[in-house]
Amino acid sequence: MDSNSLVEGLKESLSNLQAIEVEYSSISSKKRVFQLKGKLNGFIYVGTITHYPYRWGITKNTVDKIKTKGKPWCVILLYESPNKGYVISSKDYDERTHAWPYTQGGYKISNGKSLVGIPKFTTVEKLFSLLFKTFLRTP
């Protein structure tokens, strides 16, 4: 499965939930940012990796654009399947960027120490629950 398939699979899985609508956002020309509407209102930025070792790149400029919207947001890091990954809240993102290597306009996050304490999901239902908790805590 390639990165685009992972993202499309995630969009489809979330869209199948009756509680939310999932729309591409113009924030990312690479179709990695989605706006959620309905029971969850905010943005998700999706990073993907299809093979081990798991290393994701999160573009700082994209996150900065999301922040200007004034809505809750988070980063989802997918690996192996559309329903397997991590949810990095905006608060965790802001608190951890100092510890992540920064190169070529983005933060490089790897599996292991970079993600200690970051919630993990293996089903779309668990992802929805994590998103709900994350968006609820966002000021």
Image (spheres, helix red, strand yellow):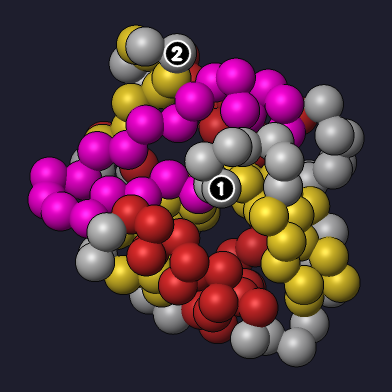
SS at mark 2 in the image:
loop
Q: Is residue 52 magenta?
A: yes
Q: Residues within 10 Å of mark 1 (few under 14, many from 20)?
A: some
The residue closer to the viewer here, 8 or 78, is: 8
- Is 74 left or right of 116, judged from the image as shown? right
Image quarter of the N terminus:
bottom left
Sequence order check, earlier mark of 1 and 2: 1
Instruction: Say which residue appears at 78% left-offset and 46% top-offset.
Output: 72
Observer-side mark, 1 or 2, equals: 1
Residue for badge 2: 105
- The answer to whether residue 133 is seen in the rendering is no
Range drawn in magenta: 46-66
Q: Is residue 71 magenta?
A: no
Instruction: Say which residue appears at 55% left-offset and 77% top-offset.
Output: 12
Picture coordinates of residue 128, whole percent (x, y): 62, 73
Picture coordinates of residue 92, whole percent (x, y): 56, 36
Q: Amino acid at mark 1?
A: Lys
Q: Which mark is residue 31?
A: 1
Does residue 68 lie above or below 82 as drawn?
A: above
SS at mark 1 in the image:
loop
Instruction: Say which residue appears at 63% left-offset and 86% top-offset.
Output: 16
Q: Residues within 10 Å of mark 2 (few under 14, many from 20)?
A: few
